[in-house]
Image: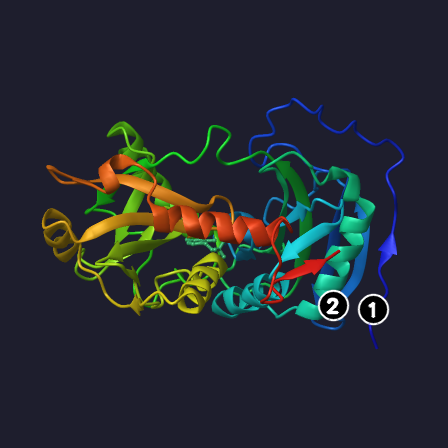
Amino acid sequence: MELSITTKLSDHLTPKPAADTELGFGQIFTDHMFTMDYSRESGWHSPQIVPYTSLELDPSTIYLHYGQAVFDGLKAYRTPDGSINLFRPMLHLERINTSSKRMVIPPIDPAFCLKCLKELLQVEKDWVPDRPGCSLYIRPFIVAMDPCLIVRPSVTYRFFIILSPCGSYYPQGMNPVSIFVETEYVRAARGGSGQAKTPANYAASLIAQNKAKTAGCVQVLWLDSVHRRYIEEIGSMNAFFVIDGKLVTPELNDSILPGITRRTVLELARDMGFRCEERQIAIDELCHLAKQGHVSEMFGSGTAAVISPVGELRYQSERIVFNQGKTGKVTQLFYDTITGIQYGRTPDPYGWTEKV
Ligand SMILES: *Cc1c(COP(=O)(O)O)cnc(C)c1O
């Protein structure tokens, strides 16, 4: 029997940001959130929409000490007719279960959680911005709730969905970035948790992010943990190259996060007739090919930016520049095609979008 969702509306709504507010990312939250609890006896229970509020946690909560938690990130988009689109939401909710499996967290029912998300979005629909490039970021996450300092899987959990209106990633148009090739630290190890969206991976990445900033770069290019040789990801985006007209991306392994944007790019590319390769790409091979003029474009893919062009790589003393530091045609094509479908400006022949 399906659980019924209870709703308690807030009696003081915050004013929506003014039309000219720079929304930025992840700093403003809507009036309500969704929560659901897990216990061994009842499984997932008590799904509810409640006013957004801070939490009271026992200081010994397992999550606070050992980071047993998972999250995901997707967006709701305002279409020209005023309706609201979600983009491949079931893939995001199913990925929570893949992440949870690695972190020994009990699975959710993705179809039920999609229904809960849609109910929450019905309550918060006025928070979906209608300005170009803006969207409502959706952050579902699960945290371990047992008050206990023993290192073991929790037996109680809480699932949340919070919502945050966010601004355009590219208010001044797409801007290729400089990326620092990290040869000391790794994001995730083979056999580790790199495939899961779990807090530890992001905490572990901060030190290299600081190194990249110091070097004047905006993000890190991660190499594999065994050889420090094979390209894995760019910050928290998947990596793509255009090599001799072919679209090339690192093949998935257990230290690469399987991005839904990555999957979308590959599916679109194959449909458009691009030759695609998912394979290991060594950084020295890439340098060599780039010097010979074979690598025309590089970009990252992820929900936040969709597609992010890379203008140059800094690898030790070398600088590898792509497409003279300008956004390439293939990069622009994927950005325009994917955002066109997400915002409902162009038809969606793939059934990727879903109305709220
Ligand atoms: C979320 C994420 C991505 C991109 O995944 P999308 O599903 O495309 O948003 C890539 N790499 C890492 C490390 C991530 O956390």
Foreground pick, 99 / 149: 99
Q: Is mark 1 within 8 Å of ligand 1?
A: no
Q: Quadrant of residue 263?
A: bottom left
Disc 2 designates what residue?
112
Q: Is residue 245 above or below residue 279?
A: above
Would residue 266 appear left or right of 90 to someone viewing this image?
left
Query: Is residue 338 among what the camera can see?
Result: yes
Dot 1 or dot 2: first in sequence order is 1
Secondary structure category for the residue under label 2: helix
Query: Is residue 146 among what the camera can see?
Result: no
Image-quarter location of ligand 1: bottom left
Label 1 Cα crowd, 10 Å radius (few <14 / some 14-19 / many 20+): few
x and y percent of residue 35 in the render? 74, 54
Q: Are marks 1 and 2 in contact (CB under 8 Å)?
A: yes
* Quarter of the figure that contains the N terminus: bottom right
Q: Which mark is residue 184?
A: none
Disc 1 designates what residue?
3
Q: How is the image coloured?
A: rainbow
Amino acid type for the residue under numbered disc 2: Phe
